[in-house]
Image (cartoon, rainbow, N blue to C red):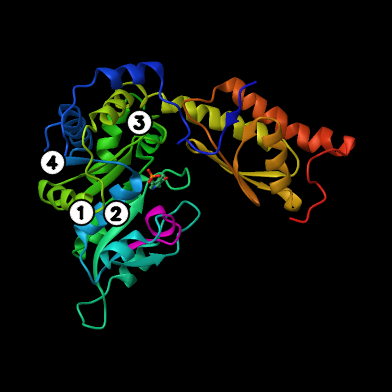
């Protein structure tokens, strides 16, 4: 049996068709702005998100960084969730490279910052304070879809107070698929989500299954500033159409199918719910979080790994579904978890069961 790799939706391999699209792509030098495939991708994603322009980026981290630094200057600040990716998991880049101060706020279990907290964190124009410039949200956050009402009211509050708004939409396609109305296309829903924000960053290398790449989408003016910053960050790539071709292919062929990943996550969550010792926390999109009783998380992870199933976590485990995992893989993962809890203790052989954890 092949390894069932549920560590992240970034582990996907380009499909044969994606590799063909890559080989066939017309190329130029994107630093001169004449790579036709990069230009086609940028026009496509700008149109899909309803923004004037877009800029292809090597990673989501660089896309968020260039976005924040295009909105904020030295001594400005941005409001962001305490557990949001741009604050917590991007090396503090906005502060390190841009002297932009983050103002992190507590989030609820769905990832939302309270509107009252946002309002209270916006500083008056006074030399004591950094200048509050930007509100940054994330959708999906830990697999949760931000409700439209929240996106609307939080961004309206920001605008009313003179702040710009940015969405870390690394998994915004998952959010669009999961929250589209019946009969509504994924792209129509994407546009509705994007409409709330001045700018957004999207990833092609997560659920969409491209090997590399993100895009920052926003106004002509913002994207022109971001282009300078991307160059400084070393993100000006040359024949980047090779990569952009994969992203274009992913938009054409891998967006609607995210529904399959969500169905597989539900299948996994439903199966795990039936196992004593596990508490399944959520499976709204393609990420399943599971709390493991009695500090057995690390032992379970080891046992899974020894049996060809990869996940991440410690006390709580995280399983992420994607293009390269099918229902047979999910069923193998479930059977392996069951074996850990049911068979292994009886045989007394489960790896590392004696702790300490
Ligand atoms: C993965 C991720 C990023 C960063 O993307 P990279 O391409 O890994 O740099 C940003 N935000 C969120 C929410 C992510 O999940």
Q: Give the labeled residue for mark 2.
A: 65
On screen, 134 above or below 67? Answer: below
According to the picture, the residue beneath numbered tag 4 turns out to be 52
User: What x and y, as percent, mark residue 122?
Assistant: 28, 70
Location of residue 107 (image quadrant)? bottom left
Sequence order check: which comes first, mark 4 or mark 2? 4
| Residue 289 magenta-highlighted | no
**Distance from Cα at disc 3 to Cα at disc 1:** 37 Å
Magenta segment, which residues? Answer: 79-89
**Earlier sequence position, callout 3 versus callout 2:** 2
In the picture of the structure, the residue carrying the numbered disc 1 is 229
Circle 3 or circle 1, nearest the eye? 1
Asked if residue 51 can be seen in this view, the reply is: no
Q: Which-is-in-front pick, marks 4 and 3?
A: 4
Q: Is residue 105 above or below residue 36?
A: below
User: Is there any visible trace of residue 268 in the rendered image?
Assistant: yes
Q: Earlier in the sequence, mark 3 or mark 1?
A: 3
Residue at x 45%, y 36% (from the top left corner): 10
Q: CA distance from mark 4 to mark 1?
A: 18 Å
Q: Quadrant of residue 129?
A: bottom left
Of residue 167 and residue 36, the one placed in the foreground of this image is 36
Task: Between label 4 and label 1, give the one nearer the viewer.
Answer: 1
> Is-magenta flag for residue 81?
yes
- Badge nearest the viewer, 3 or 2: 2
């Amino acid at each position: 049996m092949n390894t069932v790799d549920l560590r992240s939706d970034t582990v996907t391999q380009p499909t044969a068709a994606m590799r063909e699209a890559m080989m066939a792509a017309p190329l130029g030098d994107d630093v001169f702005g004449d790579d036709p495939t990069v230009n086609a991708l940028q026009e496509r994603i700008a149109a899909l998100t309803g923004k004037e322009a877009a800029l292809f980026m090597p990673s989501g981290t660089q896309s968020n960084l260039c976005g924040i630094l295009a909105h904020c200057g030295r001594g400005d600040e941005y409001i962001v969730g305490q557990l949001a990716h741009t604050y917590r998991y991007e090396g503090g880049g906005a502060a390190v490279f841009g002297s932009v101060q983050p103002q992190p706020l507590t989030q609820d279990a769905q990832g939302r910052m309270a509107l009252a907290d946002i309002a209270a964190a916006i500083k008056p124009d006074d030399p004591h304070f950094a200048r509050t410039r930007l509100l940054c949200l994330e959708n999906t956050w830990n697999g949760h879809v931000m409700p439209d009402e929240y996106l609307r009211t939080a961004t309206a509050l920001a605008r009313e107070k003179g702040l710009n708004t940015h969405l870390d939409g690394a998994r915004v396609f998952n959010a669009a698929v999961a929250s589209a109305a019946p009969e509504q296309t994924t792209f129509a829903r994407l546009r509705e989500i994007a409409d709330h924000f001045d700018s957004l960053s999207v990833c092609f290398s997560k659920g969409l299954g491209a090997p590399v790449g993100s895009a920052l989408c926003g106004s002509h003016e913002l994207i022109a500033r971001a282009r300078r910053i991307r160059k400084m960050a070393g993100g000006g790539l040359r024949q980047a159409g090779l990569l952009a071709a994969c992203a274009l292919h992913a938009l054409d062929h891998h967006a609607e199918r995210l529904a399959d990943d969500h169905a597989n996550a539900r299948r996994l969550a439903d199966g795990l719910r039936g196992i004593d010792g596990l508490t399944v926390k959520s499976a709204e999109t393609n990420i399943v979080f599971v709390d493991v009783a009695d500090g057995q998380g690390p032992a379970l992870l080891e046992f899974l790994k020894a049996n060809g199933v990869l996940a991440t976590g410690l006390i709580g485990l995280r399983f992420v579904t994607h293009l390269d995992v099918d229902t047979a893989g999910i069923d193998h993962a479930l059977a392996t978890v069951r074996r850990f809890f049911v068979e292994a203790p009886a045989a007394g052989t489960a790896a590392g069961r004696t702790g300490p954890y």
